[in-house]
Amino acid sequence: MELVHSGKVRALYADGDDLILVASDRVSVYDVVLPTPIPGKGTVLTQLSLWWFGQLSDVIPNHVISGTDVPPQWAGRAMRCRRLQMVPVECIARGYLAGLGLESYNETGTISGVPLPPGLLEGSRLPDPVFTPTTKAAAGHDEPMTRADVAALVGAPVAAELERVTLEVYRRGAALAASRGVIIADTKLEFGLLDDGSLMLADEVLTPDSSRFWLASQWQPGRPQRSLDKQFVRDWSTGIGWDRRPPGPVIPSDIVAATQARYDELYSRLTASA
Ligand code: Q0Z
């Protein structure tokens, strides 16, 4: 199959008119891919995305054709997708203060132009989720976009729909996760257009590579939160004095096992039937 794109931890192949999206077991920490894979990670992320696409299909249609009709060597870690005209905007929804949203709040008291109450802490829940779109930079870092920037790029009707659907996907996902003891602090969504101009949810959805997941029982505003995925790898890599420059360090087997267990716990918690 023809390789169309390869990212740090995933790859995209063309199969006739379809695309095959393959998630590897590689893990990236502080933007560096480490030399040791986390066995099972690609499968967990693919199965979690497929599950969410199904949960959210009444909010918006999605690009999935099949989670099983994929080349056998990628069974479980790949999905067959429709090829869409991708919307060149990273659609982010934030429900809690972390990352760039926290930086923006600390500097201006606002996020994406939305004024927030004073006194919020790192990790605080926002009164309402906020849409914070960014550019998709080919290299380097994504830049914040205003609503007017998004409208200029995709037109006002699609821009309004992107915001509405992004916030609805976040609300629905966060409510479901909350009922299972998991906080979704924020998430990054990607959309594409069909030939008829209709919008579809694409790429991966509500996975730990596209979202911040925190255990509700350990949530404590006022400090950095422990994320429910590669926190062990991050803490360990900082603890051994790695300077965050490539090449990243080889991960010892106990850290690999603890990280695998976190991914498995996240998957079984979220997808457990009520
Ligand atoms: C997704 C990406 C990478 C995995 C393009 N349904 C679609 N139609 C057209 N394009 C895409 C999709 Cl999902 C598309 N990406 C991001 C890059 C591995 C996903 F290298 N890029």
Image (cartoon, helix red, strand yellow):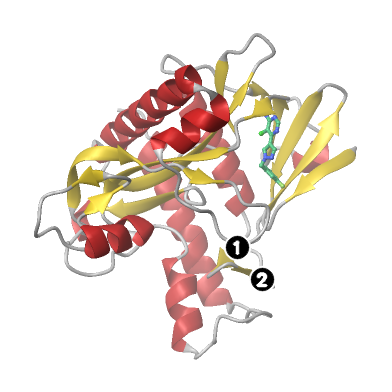
Closer-to-camera residue (89/183):
89
Closer-to-camera residue (185/218):
185
Q: In this image, 8 relative to 54: left or right?
A: right
Q: Residue 123: x percent and y percent?
A: 23, 59
Q: In this image, 195 relative to 262: left or right?
A: right
Closer-to-camera residue (174/158):
158
Q: In this image, 29 relative to 73: left or right?
A: left
Instruction: Check disc 1 and report its element: helix, strand or loop.
Output: loop
Q: Quadrant of residue 219?
A: bottom left
* Above or below for 91 versus 238: above
The residue to which callout 1 is attached is 27
Q: Quadrant of residue 243?
A: bottom right
Q: Amino acid at mark 1?
A: Val
> Do tag 1 and tag 2 residues touch (Cβ < 8 Å)?
yes
**Residue at image x 66%, y 65%?**
37
Q: In this image, 82 relative to 148: left or right?
A: right
* Above or below for 180 versus 17: below
The residue to which callout 2 is attached is 36
Closer-to-camera residue (39/186):
186
Q: Closer to the N terminus: mark 1 or mark 2?
A: 1
Q: Amino acid at mark 2?
A: Thr
Q: Residues within 10 Å of mark 1 (few under 14, many from 20)?
A: many
Instruction: Check disc 2 and report its element: helix, strand or loop.
Output: loop
**Residue at image x 81%, y 38%?**
13
**Residue at image x 48%, y 37%?**
149
- Of badges 1 and 2, nearer the viewer stands 1
Q: Residues within 10 Å of mark 2 (few under 14, many from 20)?
A: some
Q: Is residue 67 visible?
A: no
The quarter in which the C terminus is drawn is: top left
Q: CA distance from mark 1 to mark 2?
A: 8 Å
